[in-house]
Protein backbone atom coordinates (compact mmCIF):
# COMPACT_ATOMS: atom_id res chain seq x y z
CA UNK A 1 0.00 0.00 0.00
CA UNK A 2 2.80 2.43 0.94
CA UNK A 3 4.70 1.64 -2.27
CA UNK A 4 1.55 2.26 -4.33
CA UNK A 5 0.97 5.64 -2.69
CA UNK A 6 4.61 6.58 -3.30
CA UNK A 7 4.32 5.61 -6.96
CA UNK A 8 1.13 7.65 -7.32
CA UNK A 9 2.83 10.72 -5.82
CA UNK A 10 5.80 10.25 -8.15
CA UNK A 11 3.46 10.01 -11.15
CA UNK A 12 1.68 13.21 -10.13
CA UNK A 13 5.00 14.99 -9.72
CA UNK A 14 6.15 13.80 -13.13
CA UNK A 15 2.94 15.04 -14.74
CA UNK A 16 3.20 18.43 -13.03
CA UNK A 17 6.86 18.77 -13.97
CA UNK A 18 5.90 18.43 -17.64
CA UNK A 19 3.46 21.33 -17.43
CA UNK A 20 5.27 24.48 -18.49
CA UNK A 21 4.75 28.02 -17.28
CA UNK A 22 2.87 28.75 -20.51
CA UNK A 23 0.47 25.89 -19.81
CA UNK A 24 -0.19 27.13 -16.27
CA UNK A 25 -0.71 30.64 -17.60
CA UNK A 26 -3.28 29.58 -20.18
CA UNK A 27 -5.14 27.45 -17.63
CA UNK A 28 -5.19 30.42 -15.22
CA UNK A 29 -6.52 32.76 -17.92
CA UNK A 30 -9.32 30.30 -18.74
CA UNK A 31 -10.27 29.98 -15.06
CA UNK A 32 -10.50 33.77 -14.68
CA UNK A 33 -12.66 34.12 -17.79
CA UNK A 34 -14.99 31.25 -16.92
CA UNK A 35 -15.24 32.39 -13.31
CA UNK A 36 -16.47 35.82 -14.40
CA UNK A 37 -19.59 34.27 -15.92
CA UNK A 38 -20.35 32.05 -12.92
CA UNK A 39 -21.97 33.11 -9.61
CA UNK A 40 -19.97 35.47 -7.40
CA UNK A 41 -22.78 35.79 -4.85
CA UNK A 42 -25.64 33.37 -4.40
CA UNK A 43 -28.37 32.45 -1.97
CA UNK A 44 -30.25 29.36 -3.13
CA UNK A 45 -33.28 29.72 -0.88
CA UNK A 46 -33.86 33.34 -1.94
CA UNK A 47 -33.16 32.62 -5.59
CA UNK A 48 -30.34 35.17 -5.57
CA UNK A 49 -27.59 34.46 -8.09
CA UNK A 50 -25.23 37.22 -9.21
CA UNK A 51 -22.48 36.46 -11.71
CA UNK A 52 -19.38 38.61 -11.96
CA UNK A 53 -20.70 40.45 -15.00
CA UNK A 54 -23.99 41.43 -13.34
CA UNK A 55 -23.08 42.05 -9.71
CA UNK A 56 -22.05 45.66 -10.33
CA UNK A 57 -25.45 46.53 -11.80
CA UNK A 58 -27.26 45.03 -8.81
CA UNK A 59 -24.99 46.86 -6.39
CA UNK A 60 -26.30 50.29 -7.41
CA UNK A 61 -29.70 49.44 -5.89
CA UNK A 62 -28.23 49.14 -2.40
CA UNK A 63 -28.63 52.25 -0.19
CA UNK A 64 -24.98 51.95 0.87
CA UNK A 65 -23.91 52.62 -2.70
CA UNK A 66 -26.15 55.66 -3.08
CA UNK A 67 -24.81 57.09 0.18
CA UNK A 68 -21.20 56.54 -0.84
CA UNK A 69 -20.44 53.95 1.85
CA UNK A 70 -19.36 51.36 -0.69
CA UNK A 71 -16.31 51.73 -2.98
CA UNK A 72 -16.59 52.17 -6.72
CA UNK A 73 -18.94 49.45 -7.99
CA UNK A 74 -16.99 49.33 -11.24
CA UNK A 75 -14.29 47.35 -9.43
CA UNK A 76 -16.37 44.34 -10.44
CA UNK A 77 -15.45 45.14 -14.05
CA UNK A 78 -11.74 44.83 -13.28
CA UNK A 79 -11.48 41.08 -14.08
CA UNK A 80 -12.01 41.39 -17.86
CA UNK A 81 -9.94 44.58 -17.99
CA UNK A 82 -7.04 43.01 -16.08
CA UNK A 83 -7.32 39.75 -18.02
CA UNK A 84 -7.09 41.69 -21.28
CA UNK A 85 -3.96 43.46 -20.04
CA UNK A 86 -2.46 40.17 -18.81
CA UNK A 87 -2.89 38.57 -22.24
CA UNK A 88 -1.10 41.45 -23.94
CA UNK A 89 1.76 41.46 -21.43
CA UNK A 90 2.08 37.68 -21.58
CA UNK A 91 2.21 37.75 -25.38
CA UNK A 92 5.20 40.10 -25.10
CA UNK A 93 6.94 37.66 -22.75
CA UNK A 94 6.12 34.29 -24.30
CA UNK A 95 5.22 34.66 -27.97
CA UNK A 96 8.12 35.76 -30.12
CA UNK A 97 6.24 35.25 -33.37
CA UNK A 98 4.83 38.67 -34.27
CA UNK A 99 1.63 37.43 -35.94
CA UNK A 100 0.64 35.08 -33.11
CA UNK A 101 1.50 37.76 -30.57
CA UNK A 102 -0.83 40.26 -32.21
CA UNK A 103 -3.61 37.67 -32.35
CA UNK A 104 -3.31 36.94 -28.62
CA UNK A 105 -3.23 40.67 -27.92
CA UNK A 106 -6.36 41.17 -30.04
CA UNK A 107 -8.11 38.52 -27.92
CA UNK A 108 -7.09 40.58 -24.89
CA UNK A 109 -8.81 43.62 -26.38
CA UNK A 110 -12.00 41.64 -27.03
CA UNK A 111 -12.06 40.38 -23.44
CA UNK A 112 -11.53 43.90 -22.11
CA UNK A 113 -14.54 45.05 -24.14
CA UNK A 114 -16.74 42.91 -21.87
CA UNK A 115 -16.53 45.89 -19.50
CA UNK A 116 -17.89 48.25 -22.17
CA UNK A 117 -21.02 50.16 -21.04
CA UNK A 118 -24.16 49.90 -23.12
CA UNK A 119 -23.94 52.26 -26.09
CA UNK A 120 -27.17 54.03 -25.15
CA UNK A 121 -25.67 54.83 -21.74
CA UNK A 122 -22.59 56.58 -23.15
CA UNK A 123 -22.53 60.41 -22.93
CA UNK A 124 -23.06 62.39 -26.08
CA UNK A 125 -21.96 65.83 -24.88
CA UNK A 126 -19.99 67.54 -22.11
CA UNK A 127 -22.90 67.86 -19.70
CA UNK A 128 -23.88 64.21 -20.04
CA UNK A 129 -20.23 63.29 -19.49
CA UNK A 130 -20.20 65.00 -16.09
CA UNK A 131 -23.48 63.33 -15.22
CA UNK A 132 -22.19 59.90 -16.20
CA UNK A 133 -18.82 59.78 -14.44
CA UNK A 134 -19.56 56.22 -13.35
CA UNK A 135 -18.80 55.09 -16.90
CA UNK A 136 -15.41 56.79 -17.04
CA UNK A 137 -13.70 54.12 -14.93
CA UNK A 138 -14.55 51.42 -17.45
CA UNK A 139 -13.85 53.56 -20.50
CA UNK A 140 -10.45 54.56 -19.14
CA UNK A 141 -9.68 50.92 -18.34
CA UNK A 142 -10.52 49.84 -21.89
CA UNK A 143 -8.42 52.71 -23.25
CA UNK A 144 -5.44 51.61 -21.13
CA UNK A 145 -5.71 48.05 -22.42
CA UNK A 146 -5.93 49.45 -25.94
CA UNK A 147 -2.79 51.50 -25.23
CA UNK A 148 -0.93 48.34 -24.22
CA UNK A 149 -2.05 46.77 -27.48
CA UNK A 150 -0.63 49.66 -29.50
CA UNK A 151 2.73 49.69 -27.71
CA UNK A 152 3.20 45.92 -27.83
CA UNK A 153 6.33 46.24 -30.02
CA UNK A 154 7.87 48.32 -27.22
CA UNK A 155 6.77 45.82 -24.57
CA UNK A 156 8.68 43.03 -26.32
CA UNK A 157 11.91 44.98 -25.74
CA UNK A 158 11.31 45.46 -22.00
CA UNK A 159 13.02 42.89 -19.71
CA UNK A 160 10.65 39.99 -19.13
CA UNK A 161 11.16 40.20 -15.36
CA UNK A 162 9.55 43.66 -15.37
CA UNK A 163 6.59 42.43 -17.38
CA UNK A 164 6.17 39.41 -15.10
CA UNK A 165 6.25 41.65 -12.05
CA UNK A 166 3.58 43.86 -13.63
CA UNK A 167 1.43 40.81 -14.38
CA UNK A 168 1.75 39.58 -10.79
CA UNK A 169 0.80 42.99 -9.44
CA UNK A 170 -2.24 43.23 -11.71
CA UNK A 171 -3.36 39.75 -10.66
CA UNK A 172 -3.16 40.67 -6.98
CA UNK A 173 -5.10 43.89 -7.61
CA UNK A 174 -7.69 41.82 -9.47
CA UNK A 175 -8.23 39.78 -6.32
CA UNK A 176 -8.03 42.48 -3.65
CA UNK A 177 -10.26 45.24 -5.04
CA UNK A 178 -13.19 43.12 -6.28
CA UNK A 179 -12.80 40.80 -3.28
CA UNK A 180 -13.03 43.66 -0.78
CA UNK A 181 -16.06 45.11 -2.54
CA UNK A 182 -17.65 41.64 -2.65
CA UNK A 183 -17.24 41.34 1.12
CA UNK A 184 -18.68 44.81 1.76
CA UNK A 185 -21.63 44.31 -0.59
CA UNK A 186 -22.32 40.93 1.02
CA UNK A 187 -22.56 42.70 4.38
CA UNK A 188 -24.97 45.23 2.83
CA UNK A 189 -27.22 42.45 1.54
CA UNK A 190 -27.27 40.91 5.01
CA UNK A 191 -28.25 44.25 6.59
CA UNK A 192 -30.98 45.32 4.16
CA UNK A 193 -32.37 42.08 2.77
CA UNK A 194 -31.82 39.88 5.81
CA UNK A 195 -30.04 37.46 3.51
CA UNK A 196 -26.62 35.92 3.89
CA UNK A 197 -25.39 35.29 0.34
CA UNK A 198 -22.26 33.20 -0.03
CA UNK A 199 -19.30 33.80 -2.34
CA UNK A 200 -19.96 31.64 -5.37
CA UNK A 201 -17.92 29.27 -7.50
CA UNK A 202 -17.18 32.04 -9.98
CA UNK A 203 -15.27 34.12 -7.45
CA UNK A 204 -13.39 31.03 -6.24
CA UNK A 205 -12.26 30.28 -9.81
CA UNK A 206 -11.29 33.93 -10.24
CA UNK A 207 -9.07 33.80 -7.16
CA UNK A 208 -7.53 30.46 -8.17
CA UNK A 209 -6.88 31.71 -11.69
CA UNK A 210 -5.33 34.97 -10.47
CA UNK A 211 -3.07 33.15 -8.03
CA UNK A 212 -2.21 30.74 -10.84
CA UNK A 213 -0.97 33.70 -12.91
CA UNK A 214 1.29 34.77 -10.03
CA UNK A 215 2.70 31.25 -9.68
CA UNK A 216 3.19 30.95 -13.44
CA UNK A 217 5.05 34.28 -13.43
CA UNK A 218 7.31 32.91 -10.71
CA UNK A 219 7.97 29.80 -12.81
CA UNK A 220 8.87 32.02 -15.77
CA UNK A 221 11.21 34.03 -13.53
CA UNK A 222 12.99 30.88 -12.34
CA UNK A 223 13.33 29.64 -15.89
CA UNK A 224 14.91 32.90 -17.00
Image: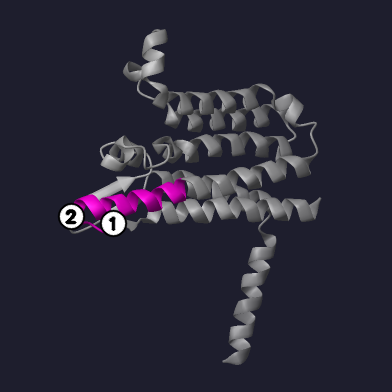
Which residue is disc 2 drawn over? 46
Q: Quadrant of residue 36?
A: top left
Residue plotted at (45% across, 39% down) = 75
Q: CA distance from mark 1 to mark 2?
A: 9 Å
- Range of the magenta residues? 178-196
Secondary element type, mark 1 = loop
Which of 137 and 199 lies nearest the eye of the viewer?
137
Left or right: 116 with respect to 96? left
User: Observer-nearest residue: 75 or 220?
Assistant: 75
Q: How is the image coloured?
A: one colour
| 2 w.r.t. 40: above or below | below
| Identity of the residue drawn at 74% across and 25% down | 153
Task: Assign the magenta stretch its main secondary structure.
Answer: helix
Q: Is residue 207 visible?
A: yes
On-image quarter of the N terminus: bottom right
Measured along the vertical axis of the image, is residue 156 above or below residue 182? Answer: above
Q: Residue at x 36, y 18 (%)?
A: 131
Q: Which mark is residue 108?
A: none
Which disc, if any, is residue 197? 1
* Residue 41 visible to the viewer: no
If you read the primary sequence from the N terminus, does the residue marked by circle 1 or circle 2 appear first? 2
Residue 77: percent from left, percent from top: 44, 36
CA neighbours of label 1 inside 10 A, class few (<14), some (14 to 19), many (20+): many
Asked if the residue at tag 2 contacts the one at tag 1, i.e. Cβ–Cβ closer than 8 Å, the answer is: yes
Disc 2 is placed on an element classified as loop
Q: Position of residue 46 (x, y in %)?
A: 18, 55
Query: Where does the image place residue 124, in percent across and percent down from the top left?
Result: 38, 9
Residue that appears at 26% across and 40% down: 63
Q: Is residue 181 magenta?
A: yes
Amino acid sequence: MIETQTEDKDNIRNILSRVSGADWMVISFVLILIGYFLPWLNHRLAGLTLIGLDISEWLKFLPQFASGELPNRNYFYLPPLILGALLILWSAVEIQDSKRGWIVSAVGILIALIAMPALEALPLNGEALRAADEWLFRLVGIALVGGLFLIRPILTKIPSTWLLAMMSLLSVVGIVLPGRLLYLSRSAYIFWLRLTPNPGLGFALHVIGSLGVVLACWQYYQRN
